[in-house]
Image (spheres, rainbow, N blue to C red):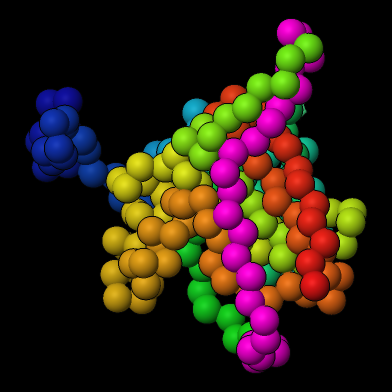
Amino acid sequence: MERLAIANRLYAAEGTLRYIRFVDDFPSVAYNSAWMDIGGVQSRSDPKVYVVQTATEAVKRCLLMTTDPGDLVFDPTCCSGTTAFVAEQWGWRWITCDTSRVALTLARQRLMTAVFDYYELSRPPHEGVKYRVSVHGFDYYNTKTGVVESGGGDKIAVWLLDTDYDGRSLYPRQVFFPMVSDKEGWARLAKNLKAEIDEELIEAYRGTVSLPFEPGPHKRIAVKIVDDRGIESLKVLEVE
Ligand SMILES: C[S@@+](CC[C@H](N)C(=O)[O-])C[C@H]1O[C@@H](n2cnc3c(N)ncnc32)[C@H](O)[C@@H]1O
């Protein structure tokens, strides 16, 4: 320490004392493959959605190193959806899953409220007959008690609407989080984007009534409801 002080190498950092090193202090440095520049596998700078969330920078680097634009990436341990988030941001396709319903719900909300760059639509929308879906609640068969239980809109954590259900996989074109308070999720997004987003539409994404939509060529819609226990139910409806 004294020698460092004499050499004028000491400086005060925030709450601690550090010392200055110069490149030529070390004639050679062993080459290694450690990624010291990504701020750790568990980033301290990313907004923490889930406790075991991997840093976006680490996932981004892996993805860009090992895949090509438009590739399909699969993360079987979704957690809060970092892989899907990064893939979406870079225009990759993605599939993800997890055993934890909590993780999936958090990932869903993270992805649906994420802000990405604008992309031009390949087809301009055209006007036709519009529908709205109103969700009043759900029925759930409790396998433990053998009783059908019902819940109202206030017990719906998230509901998803596919306005053109193909009968196989639900493609959520509208997603709603009725239980999210006005300080979270869509409302936070609205605040961050300010003038770029219609506050009334943002408010609608906390509700139980969909935005107006025109059914697609399948003439069939699907509504998936995830309740506050993470239990999912699906309702499919034919439309004109
Ligand atoms: C360390 S996190 C994964 C990090 C994530 N891949 C990322 O990029 O942020 C571990 C996740 O794996 C999930 N998990 C644990 N065992 C699993 C299994 N057998 N199948 C699928 N997911 C599992 C946990 O619920 C948890 O969300």
| Magenta residues (range) | 122-145
Residue drawn 84% across the image and 54% down it: 169
Towards the viewer: 235 or 192: 235
Q: Main secondary structure of the magenta part?
A: loop
Towards the viewer: 198 or 115: 198
Residue 136 at least partly seen: yes
Q: Is residue 9 magenta?
A: no
Residue drawn 51% across the image and 74% down it: 117
Residue drawn 76% across the image and 43% down it: 234
The image position of residue 183, as x and y in percent, is 30, 46
Ligand 1's image quarter is: top right
The image position of residue 28, as x and y in percent, is 51, 47
Residue 71 at least partly seen: no
Residue 23 horizontal side relative to residue 218, left or right: left
Residue 238 horizontal side relative to residue 104, left or right: right
Towards the viewer: 67 or 134: 134
The image position of residue 94, as x and y in percent, is 75, 56
On-image quarter of the N terminus:
top left
Residue drawn 76% across the image and 9% down it: 144
The image position of residue 65, as x and y in percent, is 71, 59
Residue 93 horizontal side relative to residue 137, left or right: right
Quadrant of the image occupied by residue 120 = bottom right
